[in-house]
Amino acid sequence: MVHKTVGCASCKKRKLKCDLSLPGCQRCRRIGKDCPGYPNEWDLTFRSENGTVYAKAHKKRELVSRYTKREMVSASSRSPSPQNGLSDDIQFHAVCLFFHDYIVDSCPGICDGWLDYLPDLYGRHSENPSLQDAVLAAAYANMGQRTARRDLELKAASLYHASLETVKNNLSSLQLATSDINMTAVILLGLYECINNTTFLDFSYQHVKGLSVLADLRGSLLLQGKGPTLLQIACCQVNRRNIEFGLHPSAAEKRLSKLLDSASLAGRMVMNMFNVSVFSANAFRDIRSGNPGCIWNLSILQSFKELEYAHRQWNEDAKMSFPYQIIQYAAGDNLDTNFAPEAEHHIYRGFWSEALWNKYRAAVITSNQALLARLDAAKASRPDEDFETPDITELRIQATLAIQVMVHDIFASIPFSLGDVPSYNYYNTTCPSKSTSSAGLPKSVGGYFLVWSLTVILRCSVASREQRNTARAALVRIGRQFGISYAVKSAQDFVGTAENA
């Protein structure tokens, strides 16, 4: 989804800043012209590209056609190789690779899957243009990045724009717009941006906004079909965006959070992320206000203790439901210590359970960092008072320690996420998911899940320069090993932050 200005068409045509007043802007009124009004939220979220972008897309489609034909002809005359074994059916190979790389099967009674319903949905609705184009866009982008094939990247871009246009057209019908198919297509378009986009780090969040709009419109119907899974993905992505940018949840996002399943650990984790996003956004707002009474008071401490309690309860329940094993490094272990500097590494039951653990850790880091920021601002705003009491000092120490423990555990999960060590099943043959889980094998989704936690470390002022450099090195490896350009861009954007710490 393309970011657009929100002014009226008249001001935009005249290249003037619109004042957005209602029912019409003042600029149009002053020149005696009826204001054409403003685009609505749906239009802003899903609006198709302008003429310039369409021209570029059309040029890319022509290039794709020529590249693909030439590649298919030349592929028929060469033997298959690990990088170019696509002569039989490029589309088939691309989709199979994408499903292997990004789908995580569920382990009943232990942990949920991620997009595990997609193969069945795609098989039953493969002729649906929005879903088909979205799947193929992500699949070709994944294969193109991993094999450095420019023709596949161009094909992916063409399919991405085609799917985007179909999703936009589906908005004319509430039933089509809020269907499992359309919402899954939006998720895949966001995933495409993470795989293929190297220009705008936050561009995929335009799709996050669109997904939250559709989820809110679906309302209680999210409890039907694949709705609970889609709701969880939508809320998780929205919370990550709000935490990253210090944004307060919108009214729609608050409504969605109330629909989450509080009986499931995954649902509770997403609820905790929502509460952390509120606590963090409030901290940014109050610190900017400069009001000492807003920056620190007893109610803030109470809110933080409530967050701590929720995190502690989730930790205890998760250790019972899907524990992880702590493995000490032994002589001869073939592990890349540049990306796993700790003396131990963790083994999880699957990528989804590992992702939940790292979301928990990133949320704990964020809440404690917001607390420390409040304490620093409160001390600076009260120079004449003895703010740094023994209780405040102890609070600082505990918050800093909590962050360091979470950073340590995220780093200890890197070998598992990148496929350097076997899965939990290798050590525990009683795991019921042994026959179906592919956890522990190199899968792009392991790196994809890890990206957000690593960027939280990069933004954390408590993390040392060495820890930030380790996080950045891991992001670069994720980008290069799995073809996720979002990871490389994240590492590049935080180079200055890490070096100046």
Image: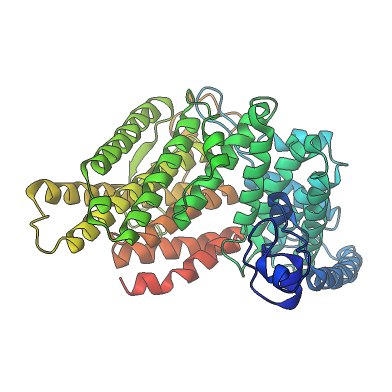
Spot occupied by residue 149 in the image (x, y as percentages of width and height): 74, 67
Q: How is the image coloured?
A: rainbow
Spot occupied by residue 252 in the image (x, y as percentages of width and height): 58, 40
Choose top left, top right, bottom left or bottom right for residue 113: top right
Above or below, 14 relative to 376: below
Instruction: In this rendered view, identify the residue nearer to me: 86 or 377.
Output: 377
Spot occupied by residue 146 in the image (x, y as percentages of width and height): 66, 61
Q: Residue at x 22, y 59 (%)?
A: 376
Residue 312 visible in the shown view: yes
Q: Quadrant of the N terminus?
A: bottom right
Q: Is residue 154 found left or right of 227 in the rendered image? A: right
Q: Residue at x 78, y 37 (%)?
A: 174
Q: Quadrant of the C terminus?
A: bottom left
Above or below, 347 relative to 89: above
Instruction: In this rendered view, identify the residue nearer to me: 389 or 85.
Output: 389
Above or below, 224 relative to 388: above
Spot occupied by residue 128 in the image (x, y as percentages of width and height): 85, 42
Q: Is residue 100 found left or right of 318 in the rendered image? A: right
Residue 347 visible in the shown view: no
Total label count?
A: 0
